[in-house]
Amino acid sequence: MSYLVQQSIERLKYSNIRITPQRHAILEYLIEKDNHPTADEIYKNLVDRFPSMSVATVYNNLRLFIHLGLVKEMMYGDNSSRFDFASTEHYHAICSSCGRIEDIYYPGLDDVEVVASTLTGYKVNSHRLEIYGLCPECQEEAQ
């Protein structure tokens, strides 16, 4: 079990949340695959291991993880939500052709909320940065 999975399980236990095999598997999938899946993709990848699991189980656990700050929901214009394990603040590069999402870690933006607050007077709650373009595979296909 990876350190992030173990740390997240401890956080769930600390919050008095029972660690079911399905809950553990969903969390582990999010951490280890790191592919920003939809709830349906998580379900399809785990249903063979847990035949009695429903899509509702996946959604309910994702909502719980979001509430606890373990997971972030990323909503896009096509009405699909993707889910991202929220271990550290990071940003996303999104392929405008295939929809692939890559994480970008850029510490230079750590103070962006403070700067935005100072410049606008807003009380900033959060921020999100997305970069759109063509991934290397789609660039190759286009040539």
Image (cartoon, helix red, strand yellow):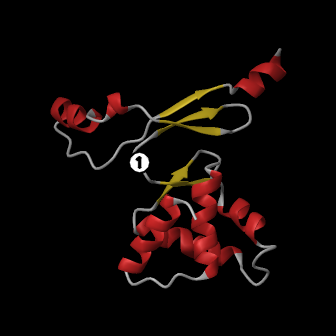
The residue shown at (76%, 84%) is: 52
Q: Report the number of numbered marks.
A: 1
Q: Position of residue 143 (x, y in %)?
A: 83, 14
The residue shown at (60%, 64%) is: 28
Q: Nearer the viewer, residue 140 or 16?
A: 16
Q: Is residue 134 left or right of residue 75?
A: right
Query: Residue 21 sits in which quadrant?
Result: bottom right
Instruction: Find the residue positioned furthest to the top.
Output: 143
Q: Position of residue 17 (x, y in %)?
A: 44, 82
Vertical order, 18 against 116 (above or below): below
Vertical order, 98 against 76 (above or below): above
Q: Name the element at disc 1.
A: loop
Q: Nearer the viewer, residue 107 or 97?
A: 107
The residue shown at (40%, 62%) is: 69
Vertical order, 23 against 32 (above or below): below
Query: Residue 111 sits in which quadrant?
Result: top left
Q: Is residue 116 left or right of residue 1?
A: left
Amino acid bearing label 1: Thr
Which residue matches tag 1? 88
Q: Is residue 32 left or right of residue 16?
A: right
Query: Residue 110 sits in which quadrant?
Result: top left
Q: Position of residue 103 (x, y in %)?
A: 54, 39
Looking at the figure, which quarter contains the N terminus? bottom right
**Other-residue count near label 1 (Cα within 10 Å), few / some / many at <14 / 14–19 / ≥20:** few
Vertical order, 27 against 82 (above or below): below
Q: Position of residue 97 (x, y in %)?
A: 73, 31
The residue shown at (68%, 39%) is: 100
Q: Nearer the viewer, residue 97 or 31?
A: 31
